[in-house]
Image: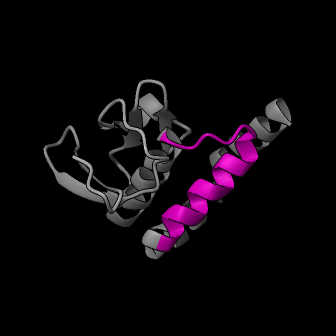
Amino acid sequence: MVSLKSELRFTVTSGIECWASLELNGWFNLMPEIIFLPKEKLYPRFGYALPLEQVAYVRKDLPGPVREFVTFHELYHLNDTSRWWVWREVKANVAAALKHPLGFIICVIMSLAPYRLKYYWKRLNSKA
């Protein structure tokens, strides 16, 4: 349900009702769906967004503040029309960090794990 204030209400697959305030360019085709998956399904990612399907996947094993940050980050991706992937990541991180600063800080610390650094290195080298 979307109001004039660009607030988005959604229900995640675990049944939790959430609210997010997003700028969505004034058009809405699908109600976003958030699916929480086990670590094994998304590893090494913390989350993943499919904008055309309006589906965001988030690891359910993440600590609460990180899960909130990653959820908002992935929701941002669902409506971002930027073409350059680095700019999309910067914008999603800033938007989510402003809403969930503690989750952002913990996420940064968790991202210093060797498997995450290796993931970032591969991603940068394959898309640069």
Query: Does any portion of residue 114 appear in the rendered image?
Result: no
Residue found 30% across the figure and 58% down from its top: 4
Residue found 16% across the figure and 52% down from its top: 17
In the image: residue 120, left or right of residue 97 = right
Q: Nearer the viewer, residue 126 or 51?
A: 51
Residue found 81% across the figure and 30% down from its top: 126
Numbered range of the magenta stretch: 79-98
> Residue 67 appears in which quarter of the rendering?
bottom left
Magenta stretch prevailing secondary structure? helix
Where is residue 22? Give x, y as percent.
42, 57
Quarter of the figure that contains the C terminus: top right
- Figure check: 99 above or below 18: below
- Figure check: 56 above or below 17: above
Indicate how the structure is coloured in the image.
one colour
- Figure check: 38 above or below 20: above
Q: Nearer the viewer, residue 60 or 128?
A: 128
Q: Is residue 97 in the magenta section?
A: yes
Looking at this view, name the residue that lies furthest to the top. 53
Q: Is residue 104 in the magenta section?
A: no
Looking at this view, name the residue that lies furthest to the left. 15
Where is residue 104? Give x, y as percent.
52, 67
- Figure check: 88 above or below 40: below
Residue found 39% across the figure and 42% down from its top: 58
Where is residue 3? Give x, y as percent.
26, 55
